[in-house]
Image (cartoon, helix red, strand yellow):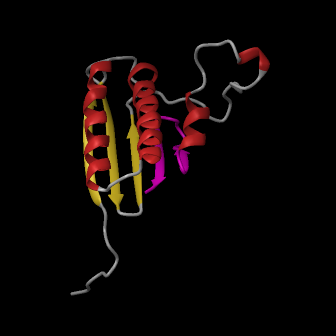
């Protein structure tokens, strides 16, 4: 039997119905992980902001608030990092061709900043090819 000296992380999974009030379950999980791993206030705030943004987008834009569809959240946490994977059952989107929210013609718009914010607050942000799954990594 082979033993591994590498410390493995703990896995958490949430399956949320595509309704906005289910975001509370996500927030509870973030708080539980932050307490258990003594996450700094800055990292906690970045995680809360990014994950709220991603999950709300998954519910509203991905699954079109169809309560038959789920948003699946997985997180692998160890003392050094948290890797969150959020997947919806929607068609996805082209994350490579989004309008620049810092362009003058977009500054007054109320939407369109989510991906920009996420890419700046998470340590790593990777979308799958289809655009219906994102992996966010935060150093703890």
- Residue 52 figure quarter: top left
Front-lying residue, 62 or 107: 107
Front-lying residue, 47 or 94: 47
Give left or right: position of 92 versus 94: left
Q: Can residue 37 be seen at all in this image of the molecule?
A: yes
Query: Where 47 sits versus 80, above or below?
Result: above
**Count of numbered circles on the image:** 0
Q: Can residue 19 be seen at all in this image of the molecule?
A: no
* Residue 126 spot, x, y in % from top left: 54, 47
Figure quadrant of the N terminus: bottom left
The residue depicted at 42 percent of the width and 58 percent of the height is 81
* Residue 17 spot, x, y in % from top left: 26, 25
- Residue 117 figure quarter: top right
Please tell me whether residue 98 belongs to the stretch shown in magenta: no
Please tell me whether residue 125 belongs to the stretch shown in magenta: yes
- Residue 9 figure quarter: bottom left
- Looking at the rendering, the stretch of residues picked out in magenta corresponds to 122-140
Query: Where 67 sits versus 48, above or below?
Result: above
Figure quadrant of the C terminus: bottom left
Question: Of all residues shown, which one is farthest toward the right?
Answer: 104
* Residue 3 spot, x, y in % from top left: 26, 84
Query: Where 55 sits versus 76, above or below?
Result: above
The residue depicted at 31 percent of the width and 68 percent of the height is 8
Question: Of all residues shown, which one is farthest toward the bottom?
Answer: 1
Give left or right: position of 20 versus 54: left
Front-lying residue, 63 or 13: 13
């Amino acid at each position: 039997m082979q033993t591994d000296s590498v410390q493995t992380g703990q896995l958490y999974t949430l399956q949320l119905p595509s309704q906005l009030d289910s975001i509370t379950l996500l927030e509870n999980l973030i708080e539980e992980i932050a307490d258990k791993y003594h996450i700094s206030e800055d990292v906690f705030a970045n995680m809360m902001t990014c994950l709220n943004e991603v999950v709300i987008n998954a519910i509203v834009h991905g699954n079109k608030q169809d309560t038959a569809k789920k948003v699946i959240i997985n997180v692998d946490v160890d003392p050094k990092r948290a890797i969150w994977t959020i997947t919806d059952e929607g068609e996805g989107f082209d994350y490579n061709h989004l309008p620049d929210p810092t362009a003058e013609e977009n500054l007054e718009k109320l939407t369109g900043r989510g991906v920009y914010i996420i890419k700046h607050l998470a340590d790593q942000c990777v979308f799958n090819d289809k655009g219906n799954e994102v992996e966010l990594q935060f150093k703890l």
